[in-house]
Amino acid sequence: MFPDSGTVAGPPAATAVFTTVLTEGPVSRVALARRLGLSSAAVTKAARPLIDLGYLHELAATERTGPGAGRPASPLAVRAERAFFLGVKITADALIGVVCDLRAQVHASARRPLTDPDVEAVLIEVGRLVDDLFGAFPGDRTRVRRLGLALSGDIDRTTGLVRYSPFLHWRDVPLGRLAAQRTGLTVTVENDVKALTAAEHWFGEGVGAESFALVTVGTGIGCGLVVNGRLVSGSYGVAGEIGHLTVDGAGPDCHCGGRGCVESIAGTDAIVARAREHTGRPELTIDEAVALARGGHERVRAVFTRAGTAIGCGIAAVANLVGPTRIVVSGEGLAAYDLFDSHIRTSFERQAFGAAARCPLSIRPLPFEEWARGAAAVSIQSLVVP
Amino acid sequence: MFPDSGTVAGPPAATAVFTTVLTEGPVSRVALARRLGLSSAAVTKAARPLIDLGYLHELAATERTGPGAGRPASPLAVRAERAFFLGVKITADALIGVVCDLRAQVHASARRPLTDPDVEAVLIEVGRLVDDLFGAFPGDRTRVRRLGLALSGDIDRTTGLVRYSPFLHWRDVPLGRLAAQRTGLTVTVENDVKALTAAEHWFGEGVGAESFALVTVGTGIGCGLVVNGRLVSGSYGVAGEIGHLTVDGAGPDCHCGGRGCVESIAGTDAIVARAREHTGRPELTIDEAVALARGGHERVRAVFTRAGTAIGCGIAAVANLVGPTRIVVSGEGLAAYDLFDSHIRTSFERQAFGAAARCPLSIRPLPFEEWARGAAAVSIQSLVVP
DNA sequence: GGCGAATACTTAACTTCTTCAAGTATTGAT
DNA sequence: ATCAATACTTGAAGAAGTTAAGTATTCGCC
């Protein structure tokens, strides 16, 4: 914690103070003490080294809120530009990268195509993308010390090991170590959905929620879970596999071997396939299907309705099982979210059991860059809680 | 912690040492230190007051295990008879009670019928059952200081409040306080499924599992979850509602408003109803249905097969979503577990995604007394972690 | 404009818990 | 008998937090 050791980790109180200010915004020391169950003296002591290191600073006294009398509070706030973080999402055919500040605001972005799934080839491209990001970043480059990588698959965040990546055909690749050697940065690796969930938990709508769920809708249907304030990892590398819940016993066959899975109804590929059947146009794209549905093509519209209903069922299963405080539904698939929204909600409310139906749902599209921001968010977390 | 204060709560290390010895059995101080990330000096100091109070004691040195040389370890073990706990399960028509020692071994049991769901009437019966249990208990009665109550419904464990109990038609009954007044004991109240899960987590097959699930099969189908070592509570009083997951879109209507829920196929009532249809005997009981199925009645057998398959689907949903380390399937409904076992496993393995199928399944019947033992287990926990 | 009540923060002494380093204890092997 | 290995204990030192008694700043009121 003392000199610029590259981490903010310290005594429990210091970590708690920093994460609270980081995720919940400017707060006075007294409010922090109440919130964290500490004495205000403890907060003062915990905050000082963080201020000295430039991670926190005092805001000017705010307007009065209480009865009126008394010294005004000087809230603690994060110096967002104290440190910057690279986040890179690895997909089958591209790398998407961003530079974020401590508060996960994007300051620059870049992307590179990916043609070869070979480990060495990917590492070379990651190196180039990092150079591109440094080039595009207008701020102080010496403050960029960490890189977060996110990709789908079974990943061990603690060791940076990619146990299995289906689309890159990787098994047991020590990606964290390799990328650290190549870039000289401190690297974190995390599953993409979990990274996005972490970002939402610390910097998005999941802030303050004891438990919450993030559902991503796109080619696949994924789900990240936070329960009791902690990300759920799954003992066998599986967690949040909402995509292959059966929601319609009479539904189509799914590549997973089941029938009527959420993904086989609401996955982008499934929607396209179904829209092609209904229009008789074998070359139809997802964008064209969306346009037809919006234009009022009844049968294509029904494909989206059915998809929304399936997603609602899947979400209801999550709500019934773990009872999250709130749920965010997002993903590229929701670019056409006007076609889904009401159907997801209706279906969710019908399937959710009892009070679980009260769980607030946020349904919104997700710019692809957000995935990279998720990777950066994990990197930010690694600064605070190593 | 000092005199017989009625709790074992103390500094973090002491609590950790005690719970570890309690749940994982005799361990040497050195092993505890390694296990808990403490220095062995800290374990020595944490253990001393626990030994002085009679909660722990030293076992004779065990046989050598390592390379051979060195002083043999003197493992710490729990004095199970240092304290006793009452556990009472409240059902719609009966109270079932047990007396357990610190290790949750049953030393006595009793039951009383319940005819009136009125709060006062139930409290009177609880008082009588407690007297019965004291009467039946052969040990030192002064060491019985705590009572755990378990019942189905929405319960706030921290305050002992029954927010809603469907079968007793209670709303916001401060059962913990009322029962404490009447019995003079320290009372804990918990949802029955969660209590059973807690028991399994500390004293059963869930010991040592970072996350695990307990599925109960009976009139209702319930599920208790432990994730990241902590019981999942659900933000809106709902968690583990596995019973109303849709597993068969073409299934029967369910009282919850859905179709093809697990409970509408595998709940005891559903099984009986289906067996009556297939036999044309409107008075058929569940025991007769089991007998027919065991006797080879094809169509009744098929009812159980379908039920097992539905349960397997529900379990797979849990495995896919939260990835527990292991799953226990239990409940009165599994008295006929020979009719279910293989179907549950087959269905689970088909529906579980990827490595989640590796999650070990324990399928076993559950004596009704176990529910009361669950209540006692929560009471034991309250001694350690208030 | 000065005074007191209210609130926010700081400081210093003290408490509690833990580790560290240096013991003691007990065994098997040579 | 001695030595190495392992288990446990002890006392001093350190870290992290609390309590209690300051200081700082504001508002309302006379």
Image (spheres, coloured by chain):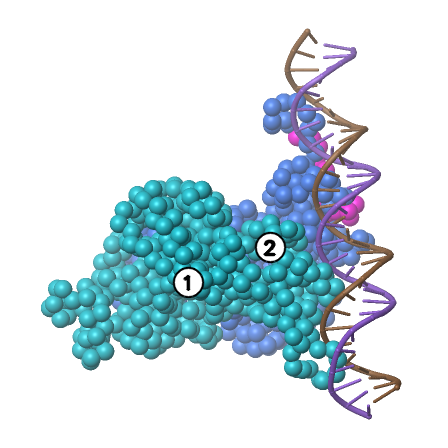
Chain colours: A blue, B cyan, C purple, D brown
Mark 2: which secondary structure? Answer: loop
Q: Indicate the position of residue B38 as horizontal and vertical percent values.
A: 70, 63
For the magenta stretch, what is the residue range? A49-62
Residue in view at x 52 percent, y 50 percent: A210
Q: CA distance from mark 2 to mark 1?
A: 24 Å
- How would you rate the neighbour count of disc 2 (Cα within 10 Å): few for under 14, some for 14-19, many for 20 or more? many
Q: Indicate the position of residue B359 as horizontal and vertical percent values.
A: 46, 73
Q: Nearer the viewer, residue A272 or A83?
A: A83
- Compared with B217, A54 (above or below) is above
* Residue B359 in view (yes/no): yes
Residue in view at x 65 percent, y 65 percent: B36
**Residue B184 left/right relative to B296:** right
Residue in view at x 62 percent, y 60 percent: B54
* Residue A61 painted magenta: yes
Using the image, tell me which numbered label, if any, was put on residue B108.
1
**Residue A1 left/right relative to A29:** right
Mark 1: which secondary structure? Answer: strand
Amino acid identity at mark 2: Val
Q: Nearer the viewer, residue B164 or B138?
A: B138
* Residue A288 in view (yes/no): no
Q: Which residue is mark 2?
A: B8
Residue in view at x 44 percent, y 65 percent: B106
Q: Quadrant of residue B336?
A: bottom left
Q: Quadrant of residue A76?
A: top right
Q: Look at discs 2 and 1 and give the one toward the viewer.
A: 1
Amino acid identity at mark 1: Ala
Q: Indicate the position of residue B161 as horizontal and vertical percent values.
A: 43, 44
Q: Indicate the position of residue A204 as horizontal and vertical percent values.
A: 55, 48
**Residue A383 left/right relative to B208:** right
Q: Chain of mark 2?
A: B
Which badge, 2 or 1, comes first in the chain's sequence? 2
